[in-house]
Amino acid sequence: GDSVTQMEGPVTLSEEAFLTINCTYTATGYPSLFWYVQYPGEGLQLLLKATKADDKGSNKGFEATYRKETTSFHLEKGSVQVSDSAVYFCALGNQGGKLIFGQGTELSVKP
Amino acid sequence: DAGITQSPRYKITETGRQVTLMCHQTWSHSYMFWYRQDLGHGLRLIYYSAAADITDKGEVPDGYVVSRSKTENFPLTLESATRSQTSVYFCASSAGKNTEAFFGQGTRLTVV
């Protein structure tokens, strides 16, 4: 079945460092891809999305590009802040309407 | 209040008891989802629904029952709770297939 695999955490970075969180997927057809973020004690909220191959989603300095050839949707940010500390989830929406998440990657940014 | 709300926020129940977690959304979104969140497993889909009276299994449906008689409500029932069902449960809704999903605040369920 369809699935999402993320790099394991936790990831610890210093403020202003470059961030990459890897995400790969397995799906039939042409899924939509998402990154969600979860702050402590809260539900998830959408960070960015891409609906077709080569699309780039971006928001709040975060970016991810839908790469069909490598079935990947890696999340990047050029300069992280302490306020970016959270758990990040990669997800796919398949043609049947399912929304499937990866296991999440915890990011901790130190001042 | 507009949005998606879950109740209760916290629940402790005994093994073998039936418990129902409630989810209500005010947007008339067609899609609704139930997930459980466990350390090391991320979010796993339990059930989802594309519209009223249409439900389908996710990745981990065993031990759970859902119904959707009205578009705005999507209750999740544990028919006979087990300790392995101790988890944080999230409900979500979206306007359509592959659109942004909005999440509730979660229900922390402990089965003792």
Image (cartoon, coloured by chain):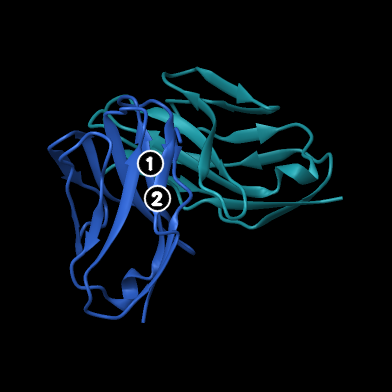
- The blue-coloured chain is labelled B
Q: Is residue A10 above or below residue A96?
A: below
* Image coords of residue B60 (percent x, y): 26, 57
State which chain disc 2 sits on. B
State which chain disc 1 sits on. B
Looking at the image, the residue that sits furthest to the front is B1
Q: Are marks 1 and 2 in contact (CB under 8 Å)?
A: no
Q: Nearer the viewer, residue A30 or A109?
A: A109
* Residue designated by label 2: B6
* Residue designated by label 1: B92
Label 2: which secondary element: strand
10 Å crowding of disc 2: few (<14), some (14-19), many (20+)? many
Q: Nearer the viewer, residue B5 or A43?
A: B5
Quadrant where the C terminus of chain B sits is bottom left
Any part of residue B23 in sight: yes
Amino acid type of the residue tagged 2 in the rendering = Gln
Q: Nearer the viewer, residue B67 or A5?
A: B67
* Image coords of residue A27 (percent x, y): 31, 35
10 Å crowding of disc 1: few (<14), some (14-19), many (20+)? many
- Quadrant for residue B110, please give it: bottom left
- The cyan-coloured chain is labelled A
| Tags 1 and 2 on a common chain | yes
Taking the image as shown, residue A26 lies to the left or right of residue B39, namely left
Q: Is residue A79 above or below residue B97?
A: below
Q: Nearer the viewer, mark 1 or mark 2?
A: 2
